[in-house]
Image (cartoon, rainbow, N blue to C red):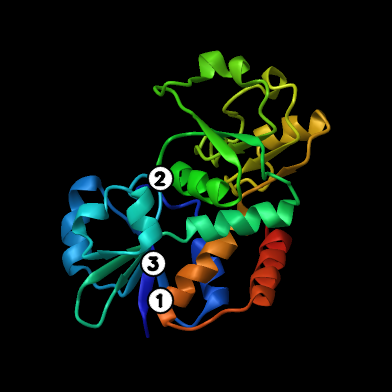
Amino acid sequence: MLRCGLLGQTLGHSWSPRIHTLLGDYEYLLYEKSEQEIPSFLRSGSWDGLNVTIPYKKTVLPYLDVLSPVAESIGSVNTIVRRADGTLFGDNTDVDGFVAMVRLSGFSVAGTKVLVLGSGGASVSICEALRSMNATPVVVSRHGPIDYDHISDQSDAAWLVNTTPVGMYPNIDSSPLDLTLLPNLRGVLDIVYNPPVTRLMTQAQSLGLPALSGLYMLVAQARRSAELFTNTSISDARVEDIYRIMLDEHP
């Protein structure tokens, strides 16, 4: 049986093992590692395929032998496969996952300005996905050229995407910003999936704005990762089924 899993720092909240159990017949474990442990784990760990999450999507890059074109372009990896010859291949399935999330939302992002909160590995993937959909992403971060103290300068933004972990379990009472500062928003996407409705989403809904969590993105990117792990194809219908199962299990 293939040995797969999720590599990150704090993973107790993750729903990935359940999703991958539904996706395929392979072992899927949680690998909580410190940054110092990453090199030895990647080189000699007993695994065949990995997903990579916060905060290691960029950390793993120097230890990989081959990158997909999209992973090389954006400098962020969320999926690693150990090939038969022992080399490590890195890809980024977050791009596919986010495109699927936007399609589910029905948001018409083409030709519009989209605020992207956060500048980490998920952010670069989502900006790449938005550009592929002819949207203009604008990154907002604590220490970047556009920061939260000047968010009102971006009041012409049509959509907002939260790629930060703010509001994620267990810190469910946190929100990355006050949406009233952005009066022209048409909708909000929060890639946090636990809890299924974040405080940011609750405020959006109170303002009459549609909002969607990151659960569908999580399932869609997991599908693509599973295809890479197993060298098989998984249907869109299976993604829909697993998404509904997860919604039922986490109302």
- What separation in Å lies between label 2 and label 1 (alpha carbons)? 21 Å
Q: Position of residue 154 (x, y in %)?
A: 61, 21
Q: Residues within 10 Å of mark 2 (few under 14, many from 20)?
A: many
**Residue occupying image coordinates x 24% and y 73%:** 46
Label located before the other in sequence (2 or 3): 3
Question: Could you tell me which secondary element the residue under label 3 belongs to?
Answer: strand
Residue 78 visible somewhere in the drawing: no
Question: Could you tell me which secondary element the residue under label 2 belongs to?
Answer: helix
Q: Which mark is residue 121?
A: 2
Residue 60 or residue 19, whichever sits in front = 60
Label located before the other in sequence (2 or 1): 2
Q: Residues within 10 Å of mark 3 (few under 14, many from 20)?
A: many
Q: Which mark is residue 5?
A: 3
237 above or below 142?
below
**Residue occupying image coordinates x 43% and y 81%:** 230
Question: Could you tell me which secondary element the residue under label 1 belongs to?
Answer: helix
Identify the residue under disc 1: 229
Residue 44 or residue 250, whichever sits in front = 44
Residue type of the residue flagged with mark 2: Gly
**Residue occupying image coordinates x 50% and y 56%:** 95
CB-based contact (under 8 Å), mark 2 and mark 1: no
Q: Classify the position of the C terminus by image quarter.
A: bottom right
- What separation in Å lies between label 3 and label 1 (alpha carbons)? 10 Å
Q: Position of residue 225 (x, y in %)?
A: 46, 69
> Looking at the image, is mark 2 or mark 3 nearer the viewer?
2
Residue type of the residue flagged with mark 1: Phe
Q: Position of residue 11 (x, y in %)?
A: 42, 52
- What separation in Å lies between label 2 and label 3 (alpha carbons)? 18 Å
150 above or below 52?
above
Residue 166 visible somewhere in the drawing: yes
Q: Image check: 89 left or right of 62?
A: right
